[in-house]
Image: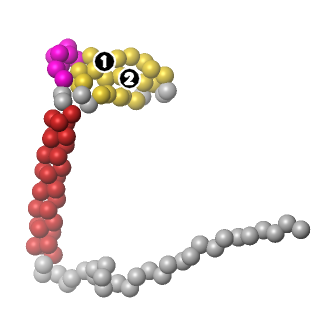
Amino acid sequence: MTIRYDPRDLAEIRVYLGDAFLCRAVCQELAGQTVSLKDIVRARNARRREVRAGLSARAQIVETLLGSSPALPTAESTPPAPTVAPTLKRYWNE
């Protein structure tokens, strides 16, 4: 089952079973409301900022907890992995 929706019209979703259209589901409470594209972008950016702030707070907690343990190797201290050039096989027909 696949559910598709238009972010500007949250009152309606379309339901597909496999590749075949099954039905439309309409929420009567939201039927007259529309959401502008600016509101959607604003909400996504706000959520992104919230997640980023939460991740940085958790990273600080992890750094605090691991502060007394020995440092983990960083990407700069490890030697770079050797790059392997792909070889192209050639077949010669006689």
Q: Label 1 amino acid?
A: Ala
Note whether 33 is above or below 7 in the view shown.
above
- Main SS, magenta region, reads loop
Q: Can you give x and y, in whole percent of width and height, for residue 36 in the image? A: 18, 30
The residue that disc 1 covers is: 25
Residue stretch in magenta: 27-34
Residue 38 position in % (x across, y down)? 17, 36
What residue would you read off at disc 2? 15
Q: Secondary structure at mark 1?
A: strand
> Which is nearer the eye, 27 or 32?
32
Disc 1 packing (10 Å; few <14; some 14–19; many ≥20): few
The reply to whether discs 2 and 1 touch (Cβ–Cβ < 8 Å) is yes
For marks 2 and 1, give the CA distance: 8 Å
Q: Is residue 61 left or right of residue 18?
A: left
Q: Is residue 56 above or below residue 16?
A: below
The picture quadrant where one finds residue 92 is bottom right
Q: Residue at x 30, y 85 (%)?
A: 77
Asked if residue 45 lies in the magenta stretch, the reply is: no
At 74% from the left and 70% from the top, the residue drawn is: 90
